[in-house]
């Protein structure tokens, strides 16, 4: 454990010259690949087919020749080699925790985490939380679901390793949010972990219970699970509500320690803690690294995991990166200055324009009178796609009458049109119309498939 007044957990590793770090990463990549080649038929088969061998990796450019791993491949491996797949690199007796995806859209993916890896994850999460300004004895209130979801567990074991007071409150049960507000007012935690959408729901519930969110006396809210904490308008809104700093974090559950893309107390956006998980921003088609300042998709490789190591796991998330030379915290890691925008497959196209839901989030959260929740509804009338944004408004907007509602709608439509490049119709509803969430917000409803099916049915197809 570092001295409490130290900015860094590992000063040498966190501030070393990028060239020196890259040399160390190359050696580690060779070792991780050799280990996986020996232990996992999945990787041995995949790399043999591609004509790639661990001994050939002598530079980061060589590593770009290693084929990416996709979630579909992991699911197929587990379907053929139940339940953990043939990329499990430890004996089943060494498995300490089992987590996974929900499986609501298909076969779930099973995460088998070894005993040694559980300690590695805890240490890595603690390092990042130290960088956020948390110290031994600070209280961390965890307001997210404790089940398959790795976010809650990673935060818990990281806070424990840090020596913090952990409050694993959870989320999801009826009435739990109101009780969370009561407990936070009583215990005054230093930090809150959850999702951005849940933090807004918590604040709204607290006010309804007669509790001011600033009475929690939080100093920090750190989030994962969905875009938002790096969207300036949403980040600023949450900081204003709670009077506390917001820090963005999170990669993928498969990549736990997922916090290795995370901001620090002094640095916005998300640092890429490259000595824990080597992260590349790559062209979505060639899977080669893009240059600094360019946009691409994230590709992750474990450097310290042994049970189910992910090597060049393709995320499907969109972002852009910088070399980190101007990081205010002094860490020399690359940085995602605007965080992760969202998944590439979340993008939708309206009349030739590519639109990300996070862009709509950003516009609405800048509007005075926005109630905090919305739905994005995509439909088709004839041959043309139509975009409807159904947003709620604060009660005082409704109290001011039709003119105030019309003014809010007109401004929302104008601002959305300016940012998105296409016309969006806006419908305003009362704040109790759109359900809130205790977990990740699901805001996009695409009715175009329904339209096509109805047209097809009418043609007897």
Image: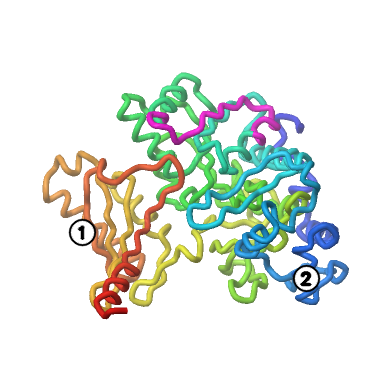
Q: Secondary structure at mark 1?
A: helix
Residues tagged 2 and 1 counted as in contact (Cβ below 8 A) = no
Q: Quadrant of the C terminus?
A: bottom left
Cα–Cα gap, marks 2 and 1? 56 Å
Task: Identify the residue at horizontal 70%, vertical 32% (top origin).
Answer: 161
Name the residue beneath numbered marker 1. Answer: 410
Task: Identify the residue at horizontal 25%, vertical 61% (top origin).
Answer: 413
**Nearer mark to the viewer, of 2 and 1:** 2
Colouring scheme applied when the structure was drawn: rainbow
Asked which quadrant contains residue 291, the reply is bottom right
Give the x, y percent position of residue 34: 85, 61
Give the x, y percent position of residue 278: 72, 57
Give the x, y percent position of residue 163: 69, 27
Q: Is residue 297 above or below residue 225?
A: below
Name the residue beneath numbered marker 2. Answer: 47
Give the x, y percent position of residue 364: 33, 53
Q: Quadrant of the N terminus?
A: top right
Answer with mark 2 or mark 1, whichever residue precedes in sequence: 2
Asked which quadrant contains residue 159, the reply is top right
The reply, left or right, for residue 334 in relation to residue 17 is left
Q: Is residue 98 above or below residue 443?
A: above
Q: Write the start and end of the magenta stretch as one range.
A: 157-176
């Amino acid at each position: 454990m570092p001295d409490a007044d130290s900015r860094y957990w590992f000063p040498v590793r966190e501030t070393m010259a990028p060239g020196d770090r890259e040399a160390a990463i190359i050696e580690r990549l060779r070792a991780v690949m050799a280990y996986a080649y020996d232990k996992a038929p999945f990787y041995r088969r995949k790399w043999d087919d591609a004509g790639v061998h661990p001994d050939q990796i002598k530079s980061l450019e060589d590593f770009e020749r290693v084929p990416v791993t996709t979630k579909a491949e992991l699911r197929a491996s587990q379907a053929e080699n139940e339940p953990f797949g043939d990329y499990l690199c430890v004996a089943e007796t060494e498995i300490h925790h089992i987590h996974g995806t929900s499986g609501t859209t298909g076969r779930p993916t099973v995460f088998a985490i070894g005993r040694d890896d559980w300690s590695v994850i805890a240490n890595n999460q603690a390092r990042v939380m130290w960088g956020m300004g948390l110290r031994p004895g600070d209280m961390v209130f965890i307001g997210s679901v404790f089940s398959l979801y790795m976010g809650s567990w990673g935060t818990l074991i990281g806070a424990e390793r840090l020596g913090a007071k952990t409050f694993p409150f959870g989320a999801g049960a009826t009435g739990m949010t109101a009780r969370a507000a009561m407990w936070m007012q009583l215990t005054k935690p230093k930090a809150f972990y959850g999702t951005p959408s849940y933090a807004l729901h918590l604040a709204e519930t607290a006010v309804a219970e007669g509790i001011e969110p600033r009475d929690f006396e939080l100093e920090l809210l750190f989030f994962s699970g969905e875009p938002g904490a790096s969207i300036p308008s949403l980040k600023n809104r949450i900081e204003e509500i709670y009077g506390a700093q917001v820090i963005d974090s999170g990669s993928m559950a498969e990549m736990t320690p997922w916090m290795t893309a995370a901001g620090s107390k002094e640095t916005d956006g998300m640092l890429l803690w490259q000595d824990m998980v080597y992260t590349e921003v790559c062209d979505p088609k060639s899977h080669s690294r893009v240059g600094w300042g360019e946009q691409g998709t994230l590709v992750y490789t474990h450097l310290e995991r042994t049970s189910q190591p992910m090597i060049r796991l393709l995320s499907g998330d969109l972002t852009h990166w910088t070399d980190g030379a101007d990081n205010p915290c002094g860490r020399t890691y690359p940085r995602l200055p605007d965080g992760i925008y969202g998944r590439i497959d979340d993008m939708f196209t309206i009349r030739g324009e590519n639109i990300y839901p996070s862009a709509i989030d950003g516009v609405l959260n800048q509007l005075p009178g926005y109630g905090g929740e919305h739905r994005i509804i995509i439909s088709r009338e004839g041959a043309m796609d139509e975009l409807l944004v159904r947003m709620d408004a604060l009660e005082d907007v409704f109290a001011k009458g039709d003119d105030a509602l019309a003014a809010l709608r007109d401004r929302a439509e104008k601002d959305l049109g300016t940012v998105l490049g296409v016309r969006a119709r806006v419908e305003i509803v009362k704040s109790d119309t759109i359900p809130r969430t205790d977990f990740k917000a699901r805001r996009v409803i695409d009715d175009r498939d329904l339209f096509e099916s109805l047209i097809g049915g009418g043609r007897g197809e």
